Amino acid sequence: MKILVIGSGGREHALVWKIAQDERVNKIYAAPGNGGTACEEKCENINMKASDIKALISFAKEHNIDLTVVGPEDPLSLGIVDEFEKEGLLIFGPNKDAAQMEASKAFAKDVMTKAGIATADYEKFNNYDDAVTYIRKKGAPIVVKADGLAAGKGVTVALSLEEAENALKEIFIDKIFGEANSTIVIEDFMEGEEATYLAITDGENVIPLSVSQDHKRVYDNDEGPNTGGMGAYTPAPVCNDEKLTRVTNEIAKPMINELKKRGIVYKGVIYAGLMINGESIKVVEFNARFGDPECQVVLSRIESGFLDALLGAAKGNLKGINIINKNMTATCVIMISGGYPKEYKTGYEITGIDEANKLENIKVFHAGTKTENNNILTSGGRVLCITAVDKDLLSSIKKAYDGVSKITFKDMAYRKDIGKKGLKNLGE
Ligand code: GLY
């Protein structure tokens, strides 16, 4: 089988790595891929942007690709799945209408309300004056969300009114997300602990994957600005098996059923960002793709069934397909270019990746790297994802940091407390 993976982050390296383990797969192309996908035995990078849908379709036809797997949200919201399907090409991911669950916060809130899915109360605004009057009435803490895709920067959890008003000013007056992004959702602040639920669906059947916990803030103890994610672990004790079943029945299935009523079949990954507070489980957000770095740990736990699930979802028939997880815990620590998520420098040589990969049950996924004259150089904010699996959370954390200790590059930084919340929940 020949597979095309679209995207260039740690998530896509993990997808390539996992899919390559299936004996039926003899070739994978990554578009555009990164320094890590280029090093995977069955994989070849192709120099095509993830958003160049026409070029990707031509490539898939010319190379008889059996399945295309879409990593990031941008091509999904541009309608890559609709375009591939029109050409009779098999592709894994939601179509443009379904991808609105991520691309429009207002659409997602409406679906949740109609489907009876627990989420924070909210109001929608499209001008500064009404929005500012509302937040002054409600007070802080309060959450301001830009409606459209904003590269992970569209959500402000404002702990003070000043912070909330500043977020409104940035969206409506400074227009930092552009002219088009002039609708916002203002939500009540939710107390609790966040977790990420991922599942694969064909629009009818839902296969839940292992629940994970991301670490969004750049510094230890959840301090500093939000990032794409600084590390993750799975399974997350905050969401036990009973809660996982509840999420599938009370959140994932009602979501796809509500979309079905609107004539939309949701195929691909369901990403539900959860807020768990005791027995209460509410949805913070939906995304239409695997999380990054959640994908790296969730895929590391999978024993079998992954490619069949991707194929089944893309074909609209997941019946009888199971994903089996290893009875292990996975932890991933992200190494970043110091300064990220703000200003940072790139182009520095990275050493020690091979030494880290030689450690048992460790895999170094690349995110912002490139290869030049046989050297691996930094090329982005999130650089490497050091991922370890072991018998329990404490051992997998220790192992991941053993991997981190082998790697060096100028300006490198990482959080030292990945998994700490999980250990606390386990009473360790
Ligand atoms: N790690 C958060 C996300 O992928 O959206």
Image (tube, rainbow, N blue to C red):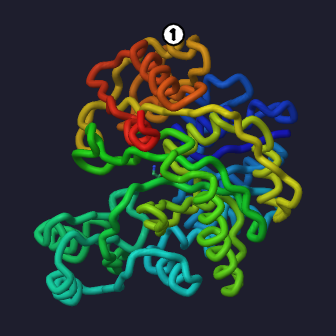
Q: Nearer the viewer, residue 60 or 293?
A: 293
Q: Position of residue 118 (x, y in %)?
A: 49, 76
Amino acid marked by disc 1 = Glu
Q: Position of residue 280 (x, y in %)?
A: 46, 68
389 w.r.t. 57: above or below:
above
What residue did someone put label 1 on? 355
Residue extending farthest left:
162
Left-right relation of 297 to 1: left
User: Quadrant of residue 85 in the image?
Assistant: bottom right
Q: Position of residue 103 (x, y in %)?
A: 49, 69
Quarter holding the C terminus?
A: top left
Q: Residue at x 57, y 21 (%)?
A: 362
Quarter holding the N terminus?
A: top right
Left-right relation of 77 to 182: right
Residue extending farthest front:
427
Q: Is mark 1 within 8 Å of ligand 1?
A: no
Q: Residue at x 36, y 16 (%)?
A: 408
Disc 1, SS: helix
Left-right relation of 319 to 239: right
Q: Position of residue 297 (x, y in %)?
A: 56, 38
Count of numbered circles on the image:
1
320 w.r.t. 232: above or below:
below
Residue 28 is at least partly visible in this image: no
Q: Nearer the viewer, residue 237 or 313?
A: 237
Q: Residue at x 53, y 58 (%)?
A: 73
Residue 59 is at least partly visible in this image: yes
Q: Residue at x 51, y 32 (%)?
A: 393
Left-right relation of 330 to 314: left
Q: Mark 1: give few (<14), some (14-19) or many (20+) Cα within 10 Å.
A: few
Q: Nearer the viewer, residue 288 or 347?
A: 288
